[in-house]
Amino acid sequence: MAQASKKQPQYPNVELPSFYTRVGVQVSSLISRGLNLAYEIEAALPSSIGYPQVDPSGSTDPLAPLPSPLDRLGTSPTPHPLESPTQIQRVVAQPPPLAVEPQNAEQTSWAMVWLHRGLHKYQHKDYGGAKDNFKQALQKQPTLGAAYNGLGGVLYQLGEFLEAIVVYHQALDHTPEKAQIYCNLGSALYQLQDFDEAVLAYEQALHWNSSLQLAYYGLGLAYYQNGSPQVAATAFEQATQLDQTHAESFLGLGVALYALGDLQEAAVASHQAMQLNPRYRQTYLALHRYLYDS
């Protein structure tokens, strides 16, 4: 691995969101029946258990980017021709339900009930409720990696990145071959600006799943922020090849190419990002103007 410089270069202040994963959840008939019972149990819990309010202004899409009050990437001390009034947003890889061994069926069934209950609340941004449910799942099955992963996702969304890292490591203790958990770990490390460790996490994710597009995207983000735009461009390029509809990968590629001085290719990549997602129109137009005014 190339030794990355610790000094942060001044690159274009453009929107580079973190990555997220679309993962479907299949619920068996047993778990479906258990979910109904879980509703009844929760209704009987003391009313003093308070859950934080869900932001009513947020998107109803559980996978949509969430504004980050703790974002460390949205400002630059030196103005740049490509600066635009964009707001960097953060999303966490949605915690996927992992496979559970059929041993200890009764305990496992209840653990899965609370797990899916937590995933449901997580998707609806009820992070307090999801946190309680994931902990209940772990009480039933302390080795359930998916519940640790879900708990880590809640902590991430609450801005408790250090705590999320600890929980993701616990998830990996029980499910060490899960690429998605390494991606989540990399995302939390990235938020703490520990870019060297984030690189290691993303590379470990790719070790277990070499076709995981979002790991290449996260790797590009970490290398870019660590002052290695050449390696970042390679990672972003791989991400665009694996998913030609992921606008953020094209945007990252454009920014990395711009940092390398390849303005023509940077404009092409940024144009593709704009075509896939109009929210990047300002970034492309700023680059286009700078290119032809130079």
Image: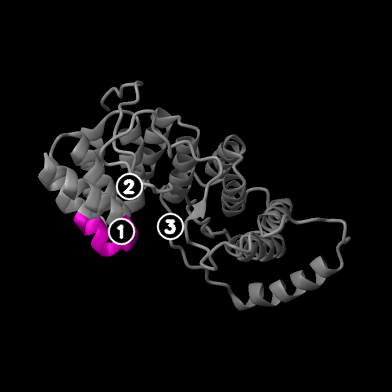
- Structure colour scheme: one colour
Give the mark, 2 or 1, whose residue is nearer the N terminus: 2
Instruction: Label 3: state its secondary structure.
Output: loop
Please identify the quadrant where the C terminus is shown: top left
Q: Nearer the viewer, residue 111 or 78?
A: 78
Q: Where does label 1 land, which residue? A: 246
**Marks 2,1: beta carbons within 8 A:** yes
Q: For the residue carrying disc 1, how many other residues have a C-alpha within 10 Å: few (<14), some (14-19), or many (20+)?
A: some
In the current view of this chain or complex, which residue is farthest to the front?
A: 293
Residue at x-position 62% and y-position 78%: 29
Q: Which mark is residue 90?
A: none
Q: Residue beneath label 2, please?
A: 217
The front one of 264 and 100 is 264
Relative image position of residue 275 (x, y in whole percent): 24, 63
The question of residue 234 being in magenta is answered with no
Which quadrant would residue 70 be assigned to in this image? Answer: top right
